[in-house]
Image (cartoon, rainbow, N blue to C red):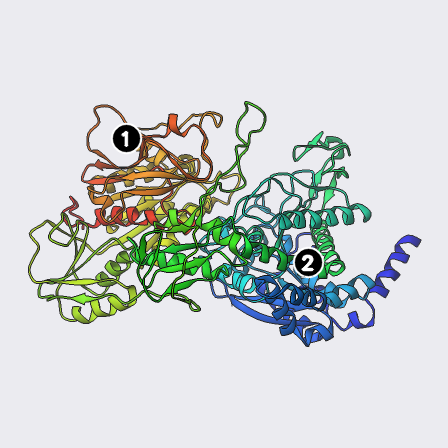
Amino acid sequence: MKRLLTTFLALAVTFSAFGQSIPHPRETFGHEVGADYKLADYDQMLEYYDKLAASTDRVQMIEIGKSVMGRPIKLVFISSEENMKQLEKWREISEKLSRAEITEAEAKEMAKDGKAIVWFDGGMHATERAHAQMTSELMWRVASEESDEMKKIRDEVITLVVPVINPDGLDIVVDWYRKTLGTPYESSSPPVLYQKYVGHDNNRDWFMNNMPETKAVTTVLYDQWYPQIVHNHHQTAPRWAMIFIPPFRSPVNQKIHPGVTTGVNLVGTAMANRFAMKKMPGAIATTSYSMFWNGGMRTAPYYHNQIGILTETAQPSPTPTEYDPERMPEFVGGKAANSTEIFYPYPWKGGTLHFRSAVEYMLEASMAVLDLAADKKEEFLYNIYSMGRDAIEDESGAFAYVLPKDQWNPSEAMNLTNILMQGGVEAHKATSDFTVNGKTYAAGSIIFYGAQAFRPFLADLMEEQVYPDQFQYPGGPPMPPYDLAGWTLPMQMGVQMDRITASFNASAEEITEKLVPTPGVVAGNGRYGYAFSNQDNLSAKAVNKLQKAGYTVSVLGADEGDLKAGSIVVRSKRGLDAQVESLSKELGINFTGVTGKPSAELAELNPVKVGIYKSWQANMDEGWSRWMLEQFDFDLDTLHNEDIKTGNLSQYSAIIFPSQSGRGILEGNNPRRAPEKFAGGIGEEGVAALDTYAKSGGSIIFFDAASDFAIEQFKLPVTNVLSGLKSSEFFIPGSLIRTKIDTSKPLAFGMMGEVAASFDNSGAFKVQDGATGIEEIAKYADEDLLMSGWALGEEEHLAGTSAMLNAQYGGGNLVLFGFKPQFRGQPRGTYKLIFNAIYQGAKKNKMNTKR
């Protein structure tokens, strides 16, 4: 009792008179942060943030953007009162040091005068419930605590906190937990994605920046504040550990500066020591997570010379969890739990885990970061400059990466430029023709010079990844990479890019604004109508806009003059001239007038309408598919189990089944694990409805794993040749595979003859001998399959097999993709295969009397 009284008095002194004027979150939430069975929602949190910012000159708050569903995303700044009066000064110093375009003497002076910029965030993965709750207390503590440690932190550090990156998901999960509290489903996940489109993949979007939440944060990180340390909170730790902390396991990406890698290790060591000295057991390192993949919230900073920190803390639910000490395992996270491990020296022995425990571990991990940053602020500031200079002066890297003006798919070259610029890369546009190594590049070509501080980010996205061979033991199965092994953007997006090592001179101007399409040209007499190429992905958007405006759209079935097979012909009608002028300007598409009906076959399209299957097993691939189709203005309906079983499917040109296991589609959630409304799949009734739909002329499109469902349920004479192979025989984890396209087939009109397929332990097909009515649209290359990433056994098991099939089924079609052609919104070079498959189902000459 005496010890408890002493501790209480010490805390009272630590949070003294000044702290009393700063409101604690409990006063707004109505409970302690991390209380059992309690969660604050976003409205409560916004109310608290406002009160906190209004209570003290140590805190300022701004809005940096909106979530995908329109909720405000807040950024909170915390430091001493004096520092807060000069925020722009500290921001400018951080920017100049990060961009590294100043002299060494200037950098040393700025490092001495400046303040460390440290970033924290919470609430990204909404089912990891503790960190969104914890950030309110973290902000209160940094603002109000009067310990010597915290005073130094406020003097030397500008703390940036985005308390909830994903406010939509927070409320979805809080609402679900409150509704299921006291039921068998109390700690379950909601049956919908906790971000409208991407769910858990909101932490896989950090170089593409497809989502508004990602864009908002990326702008702050790489265009405004340039923090030296970025701490991304997550859950959960390996079972029977309390928190995962750095160092990470191997491999590390070769593009990352070793100063980043060792900086990460330094922060992890500070965390481990703090936990040990505060008698908080269970910190474990070097398990699961590596430093190779780009694209995560804590990994993208590496390529900007920032120290990215991931922690994974136990107990993601407010419902307590029991760990019987008598059942403590011998190994935790692959490490001996007997205090003999360097990276797990202080094992947790079990007991009851409360939600508050997660909050306390997160707070102490954050304090370790802040304490280290305050002690070494000059070193961190100078190091980010030094790493930037190393990138600028790196003579072993490319002199420049050039996107020639003439591109097969111009809008994707534009998108690639914008993606890189969003990530802080400097880009230039040639103002006149220039020649390098005998090749002439036209004015308008895009140049990314290598000599810039963020060269690692630029080079990593532009060049192929070479993932090192890693096996669990000699002769054993491969050790899977964390997330992906290859993601090279020009390959995925179908953009021609030249890596140039020789120096050259070009007249060019820096691009300072997001690129938009260069207006197209409308030429010729449109007495019959207008035609336009379907090579550019934006042609699909033009088709959809024209149809919605009431115009008749057809697909050209064969080459005719300058028009290629697959070209789109829109029939003349009042107002069309103005419509094509507008679309040409908006989308950068060239329209050619057509005076008479083409002699080649014209396949008129019914109004295109797509149904997409959405299981109650929240499916990120479904969300990404839905997002992608919306970007091109497709008329789109979501189809749940009952819609498939009893709905009017005949209204749809095509129905898409995103990648999902056959069992998941057929059976869905187990009734013991989900409320009745959200249990089950489409069942035999749904399969019968799909069978009728397809035989009556409909098209059903299956991505990756869903193709196995199609093969089994529709008894197709097709085999997935990779089924049943051991990972020691065949293994391709998240890599880009060379794929050949048969461009003579309507489903491949407008495609390049070779593309990069996004292959993540995906599928490959073989049509059984003697089978008819099945055509191969794409096949994996016969040799040299791996374009970027890692592959094992590809020559023996994958080479020459079918990557995409079109199977006639009654009057309709079943289209099977072995891979994900829309994976995370990245492989723009294979989008058109989806569009063409949809158009196949919309053609008027399909045998479907119901349409």
Q: In the picture, residue 164 is in which quadrant?
A: bottom right
Left or right: 249 in relation to 155: left
**Residue 368 in the image: x percent, y percent?**
74, 54
Tell me the element at label 1: loop
Q: Name the image quarter holding residue 157.
A: bottom right
Is residue 193 visible in this depiction of the protein?
no
Query: What residue is pinned by disc 1?
Result: 716
Q: Give the Cα distance between marks 2 and 1.
A: 60 Å
**Whole-percent x, y for residue 580 in the image:** 21, 67
**In the displayed structure, does residue 218 sit left or right of residue 737?**
right
Residue type indicated by callout 1: Leu
Q: Is residue 155 above or below residue 490?
A: below
**Which residue, as the protein is rendered here, is positioned at the far right?**
2
Within-10-Å neighbours for mark 2: few <14, some 14–19, many 20+ = many
Q: Looking at the image, tell me whether mark 2 or mark 1 is earlier in sequence order.
A: 2
Q: Position of residue 787 (x, y in %)?
A: 40, 39
Q: Mark 2 or 1, which is nearer the eye? A: 2
Q: Residue 380 — which label? A: 2
Along the line of sight, the residue nearer the viewer: 477 or 463 = 463
Circle 1 crowding by C-alpha within 10 Å: few under 14, some 14–19, many from 20: some
- Whether residue 447 is visible to the viewer of this picture, yes or no, is yes
Under mark 2, the amino acid is Phe
